[in-house]
Image (tube, rainbow, N blue to C red):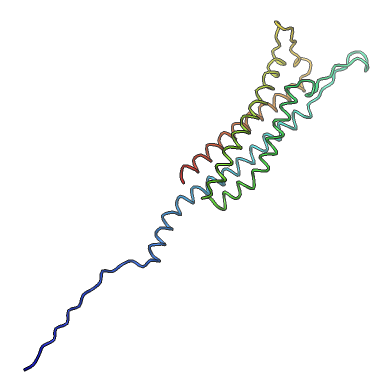
Amino acid sequence: MSQHQSTVTIQEPKSQPRGKVGAMKVAMGSGGGGVKRGLAIFDFILRLAALAAALGATIAMGTSEETLQFFTQNFQFRARYDDLPAFSFFVGANAVVSAYLVLSLPFSIVSIVRPQAAAIRLLLIILDTVAIALISAGAGAAAAIVYLAHQGNSKINWVAICQQFGNFCQRVSGSVVGSFIAAFILIVLVIISALSLRKN
């Protein structure tokens, strides 16, 4: 009497190798990292532009001086930035912001290398906000004096000196414009850092 043996084959469901699953996750996350790296590169370029604007404003204001001679050399009128406290504060504020921008460049480079580092972005947002407040205060104070220098004020007997000290007024006016440009770039930097943190 013969016995027939039957074999039943059960196929296990195919599962994706773990390596492929990990590769898919890396590929999905690499898109956000590319955007963050692009924002970090843009951040670095803008910091260089803000540094150029703030440093240029500091140098232009700090070297502004004009002397007018009347009749003899012993009778002169001189205009210098340190004759007015607002201009002195302007130079100090822009110098501090320029130094901060130089020190912030390494942190911006680290953000390019490690775009996922959220702590650096948060630190830059805080410090950039402080820099905006400082440079805006200096630019605002200097802008008020520049306006009076151009227009004068008859109520307080403030004479418009820009008719006589033309070169001096041009330099201080240009430095105030450069300072406001630096402040605007810093605002853009805060927005970029906030966008980068949002994508985390």
**Above or below 16: residue 168:** above
Task: State the residue at coordinates (66%, 27%).
Answer: 177
**Above or below 85: residue 51:** below
On the image, the x and y values in percent for residue 78 come to: 84, 19
**Above or below 178: residue 198:** below
On the image, the x and y values in percent for residue 31 come to: 45, 52
- Depth check, front residue: 168 or 83: 83
| Residue 165 placement, left or right of 182 | right
Name the quadrant containing residue 54. Answer: top right
| Residue 150 placement, left or right of 45 | right
On the image, the x and y values in percent for residue 104 come to: 64, 43
Counting every numbered tag in the picture gives 0
Task: State the residue at coordinates (69%, 13%).
Answer: 151
Direction left: furthest residue: 1
Name the quadrant containing residue 182. Answer: top right
Task: State the residue at coordinates (70%, 39%).
Answer: 99
- Depth check, front residue: 129 or 186: 129
Image quadrant containing the N terminus: bottom left
On the image, the x and y values in percent for residue 27 come to: 42, 57
| Residue 153 placement, left or right of 108 | right
Task: State the residue at coordinates (79%, 24%).
Answer: 82
- Depth check, front residue: 77 or 121: 121
Direction bottom: furthest residue: 1
